[in-house]
Amino acid sequence: MKTEGYASNEHYDEMFTPEGSVRNHYREFHNYLSKASSKKMNQLQFSANKTQKSMGMTFNVYHDNQGLEKILHLDIIPRIIPNSEWKKLESGLKQRIYALNLFLQDIYNEQKILKDKIVPSDLILGSKDYLKPCIGLTPPKGIWCHITGTDLVRDKNGEYYILEDNLRCPSGVSYMLESREIIKRAYPQLFNDEGVMPVSDYPTKLLRMLQYLSNKPKPVVGVLTPGIYNSAYFEHSYLALQMGVELVNGVDLIVRNKKAYMQTTKGLQQIDVIYRRIDDSFLDPLTFNPESMLGVAGIFDAYKADNVALANAPGTGVADDKAVYAYVPRIIKYYLDEDPILNNVPTYLCREDEDRKYVLDNIDELVVKETNAAGGYGMLIGPKSGKEDHDKFRQLIKSKPENYIAQPTLSLSTVPCLTDEGIVGRHVDLRPYILYGKEIEVIPGALTRVALKKGSLVVNSSQGGGSKDTWVLYN
């Protein structure tokens, strides 16, 4: 299939250099692509779409009147990352997660970083995600952030930047795993020839990490889901099935004498580790939101008594607040005495007078984000918005400056995608998954999210984004 006329000179393109030559790590795939007919590629795409539907790879969109369940479109052309590039990402992510874990342990205990004024006390102590019931707690094995999905982007020079930390209930890993199975079937010989690192052992690694949190020789593990109407329910059920553990709702669990039990057909069975996919506020109506119908009454007391481990630990949300994100380079330096291996996107904190003035004066050039919003909501992309939106966000920032940050509009790298117009570039980000158990492990693959709409920089599935399989090469 022809790629002539593919424009990549405005952005960093993963396959092509600005001069139009093919990057070394894409040579084998490009050779395949140049020999394959349009009909062949379209057949592969049709087959991938059909397989996704048969697998039930759906997510729910609550703000879309066109229907609740949607397929996360999987583009047939993979994103390929050379091993040398991946090694730097791996080192940078391990460094970041280690420092953030030390930060969480500190702010809920000695609060040295606040006393030393490295991070403003009011930013942490005044955050709705700083959970007072967690003060004085140390989670099992001292680990707070067991599963992390960190979002990265590349600028026009190809430099990777951390865009966001997701330490609460990061989603998308099931799409990474299922997408790999689909794409392997599309290019079986090519996949083997390229030497792609596997991701299929993720459920095994996830289970091993969860079991590590308990001191029992054979701990009972469960996945706690809000239920079938949750946007990531497919993932909850998929991971439980792959790990061979129970998928439970809040009504399936009961706490007695500060121990958690599953209700089974054979009676009550104690559960030792819960991979919870429920937000902190809904976890326990006795400790957090009293109106929660999703959580388990008394589960936090069982957690405090070391009778059940929760992953991720309650209280981690304060560390992935978008305002706290701006301080992560300082957090790394403070705890590790190291410079960050991976840089943040330059960030303006609207809570600070000088930054706020700059944002208000240059809002048409910046991306403005609400600190506690997710999924592409509560966001303004200045260059792609009109005066009315600019004025609206100026008022929002003036009324609650602490709720907003702003960043330069990065161009985001592109990867070739198969569309009705042929092969064209679409903007992408990268979400690798990191597990923290006995050691910190970065899974050698990632969810590559794609902005399917022409010119769009918003990759979120809830905003019309799609995905790609990510090939990390052995060499």
Image: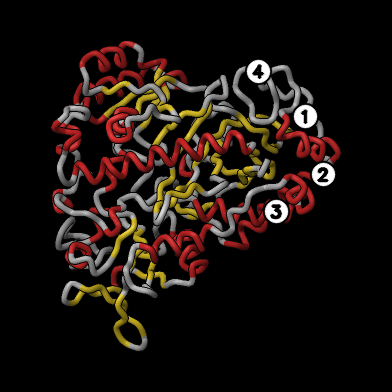
What percent of the width, then of the height, locates residue 456?
A: 53, 29
Quick check: marks 1 and 2 in contact, CB under 8 Å?
no
Q: Nearer the viewer, residue 199 or 175?
A: 199
Query: Between marks 3 and 2, how big is the CA–CA gap?
Result: 19 Å
The residue that disc 3 covers is 184
CA gap, disc 3 and disc 1: 22 Å
Q: Which kind of residue does numbered mark 2 sit on? A: Lys
Q: Can you identify the residue that label 4 sits on?
A: 9
Question: Residue placed farthest to the bottom in the image?
Answer: 266
Q: CA distance from mark 1 to mark 2?
A: 15 Å
Numbered circles on residues, count: 4
Q: Are marks 3 and 1 in contact (CB under 8 Å)?
A: no
Q: Which residue is mark 2?
A: 39
Q: Earlier in the sequence, mark 3 or mark 2?
A: 2
Amino acid at dot 3? Lys
- Identify the residue shown where x is 47% and y is 47%: 433
Toward which corner of the image does residue 101 lie, by quadrant? top left
* Snapshot quadrant of residue 369: top left
Which amino acid type corresponds to the residue marked 4 in the rendered image?
Asn
Q: Residue at x 59, y 47 (%)?
A: 73
Which of discs 4 and 3 lies nearer the camera? The answer is 3
Question: Tag on residue 3?
Answer: 1
Identify the mark at residue 430; answer none if there is no mark.
none
